[in-house]
Image: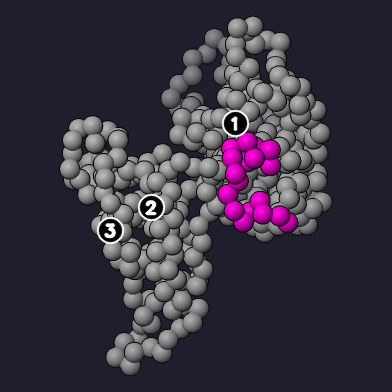
Amino acid sequence: MGGRAFSSGDNPLYTPRMPPNVYQHVLKQCHAKLQELFAVVATPIPGPAKPDYGDVDIFLAWERNSVFPRPIDSNSNKSPSSMHNALVSSAQLLNAERWYQEQPGIMITAIPWPNDFPREAIKDEQDSNNCATTRYIQFKHAHGDLWNVIGSTIRPYGLTVDEVGLYIRIPEIESLDKKKARVLLSTDPAEILTFLGLKYDGTEWEEPFASDEDLFRYATTCRLFWVRPEQHDIHASTESSEVDKSKLKANDRRRMSSRSVFRKWVDEFLPACRNAGLFAVQNATRDSVRAEAFECFPGTRHIYEARLREWNLERQRQTLWRNVIKASAPKIPEGKEETISDKCWHGQVASAFKKIIMQDNYSLGIRPLTPLRDASGFYNEERVKQFVVDNWEKVGDAISKKQHP
């Protein structure tokens, strides 16, 4: 997955994949330089036994001028750290040829290939065209292969993990608003790994796995991992890996084409486990995992339930006007054609009911004799319907008196 952010468009840069010795050299040099600006400089553990690298991922935190502020220049009312964007300063410090900010907090840069290493030809598309180019190295924030694997394992249980933390998703919301459906469980790595049943007291999170197989074996220790059996309704000629592909979300299907480790997990490892009869028992359900999450992470149940309640309240308000109030209006007698005047009158009366029911506006002197909402704020739709039916003429008469006193 070579760096391609700068390899197209006007005046593209040549950003080939890096052999391990170049990658390690660049990583070490960049860490040393960036530590001049930031107190925390770190790189995700790379995938196992990688033959080459497409880009360099570096995480930065605690800008030194903010954490350890220097005296403000008497001729300026700004501190040095506030005078330049920290990420732009980082790009300049690395002598980047180009850079752009993909989103807040994320900068992608292209820096020159190190002079310490010969620029011998690398067999790729550009070399095959005999293009004499200067090579560059691309930096980009990315998720590791392990979290791609674990993410696909925990997703069916309503869990999502990203660079911030672990979330539980609300099923009633997620198909319509993915962001609002997420409730944060924890940002603490140890808490997250413990909840997923993954060890972290060894070298698992300190150095790369020796091989893809070692990474896969570690992923299977997640307490939610299991291998879905081959379904009877899948055509007999379908390969075993299709069972796993059929359950992948769009993001995972894209990873299949771009992440070789994830593709190997789906195409080779999972089918091999299935054929050997391994991990065939599912030990949890989405409901049981949700209950465990509420128990393990105090306070999240309240946030989850409040979010769902507010969502349902808003959804009901959106449908109450159209599906209940307007739908309860008296019908035009059969055989009589509805005139424009009729439509206008019905619209006025329906709008008046909307104000009475949904805005507690009783300016017409008409109000419900019994509450239309329960203690949680939800409307009793049968009561709303009956209130409209019983009071349609009264509201119409009140509107007429107001318009023609």
Q: Amino acid at mark 2?
A: Val
SS state under label 1: helix
SS state under label 3: loop
Query: Is residue 260 rendered to the left or right of residue 157?
Result: left
Q: Residue furthest bottom?
A: 74
Q: Residue furthest top?
A: 236
Who comes first in sequence, dot 2 or dot 3? 2
The residue nearer to you, when weighing 310 against 37, is 37
Q: What kind of secondary structure does the magenta stretch mostly adopt?
A: loop
Q: How busy is the neighbourhood of tag 1: few (under 14 within 10 Å), some, or many (20 plus)?
A: many
The residue nearer to you, when weighing 373 against 252, is 252
Estimate the spatial distance between the alpha carbons at disc 2 and disc 1, rounded to whole Å: 28 Å
Q: Mark 2 — residue?
A: 22
Q: Mark 3 — residue?
A: 115
Q: Mark 1 — residue?
A: 265
Query: Is residue 311 rendered to the left or right of residue 30?
Result: right
Residue at 44% over, 55% down: 24
203 within the magenta span: yes
SS state under label 2: helix
Estimate the spatial distance between the alpha carbons at disc 2 and disc 3, rounded to whole Å: 10 Å
Query: Is residue 196 rendered to the left or right of residue 111?
Result: right
Q: Is residue 152 visible?
A: yes
Magenta residue span: 201-218
